[in-house]
Image (cartoon, grey):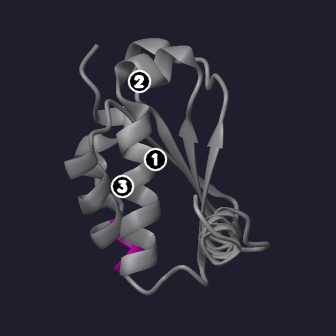
Amino acid sequence: MKSLEELARIREQTKAKIALREKEGAVRVVVGMATCGIAAGARPVLSTFVEEVNGSGIGDKVSVEQTGCIGICQYEPVVEIFDGDQKTTYVKMTSDKAKRVVAEHLVKGNVVTEYTIGAAKV
């Protein structure tokens, strides 16, 4: 950082990312970011959700958030989507799976059942 203008630009970019993550009344995408999730690859999954939600034009309806331990470490990275009183739990997520979940579930409203905890092979 070499100038106040650059600092202001960084501040605005950060504020936009935080606003994307904290929308009231929106569909919530929650990514487990405890040490088990991070070790399993949750960081790129979280980044992909933020980028895809923002790029898909649904940022006003969907918030992307992170949380600590969800409690099912063997299925990490875990993503939970809360839409009203409905909760969908996606397991063993990757960036590619996250892109499909945004396109199918968040944009079109169709749960990607093969990525859900109910379809996971133990």
Q: Which secondary structure, mark 2?
A: loop
Residue 90 percent across, percent down from the top left:
40, 41
**Real-space Cα separation, disc 1 to disc 2, in angstroms:** 12 Å
Residue 4, above or below 94: below
* Mark 3 in CB contact with mark 1 (< 8 angstroms): yes
Quadrant of the drawing holding the N terminus: bottom right
The residue shown at (31%, 53%) is 98
Task: Give neighbour class at mark 3: few <14, some 14-19, many 20+ (Cα, 10 Å).
Answer: some
**Real-space Cα separation, disc 3 to disc 2, in angstroms:** 16 Å
The stretch drawn in magenta includes residue 113: no
Q: Nearer the viewer, residue 7 or 91?
A: 7
Task: Write the start and end of the magenta stretch as one range.
Answer: 105-110
Residue 33 percent across, percent down from the top left:
56, 30
* Horizontal side of residue 112 vs 13, given as left or right: left
Viewer-nearest of discs 3 and 2: 3
The residue shown at (32%, 59%) is 101
Residue 42, above or below 55: above
Residue 6 percent across, percent down from the top left:
60, 72
The stretch drawn in magenta includes residue 107: yes
Quadrant of the rendered structure where residue 85 is?
bottom right
Amino acid type shown at disc 2:
Glu
Q: Which residue is mark 3?
A: 48
Q: Which mark is residue 76?
A: 2
The residue shown at (29%, 71%) is 103
Q: Which residue is mark 1?
A: 46
Viewer-nearest of discs 1 and 2: 1
Of callouts 1 and 2, which one flags the residue occurring earlier in the amino acid sequence? Answer: 1
Task: Give neighbour class at mark 2: few <14, some 14-19, many 20+ (Cα, 10 Å).
Answer: many
**Real-space Cα separation, disc 3 to disc 1, in angstroms:** 5 Å
Amino acid type shown at disc 3:
Thr
Of callouts 3 and 2, which one flags the residue occurring earlier in the amino acid sequence? Answer: 3
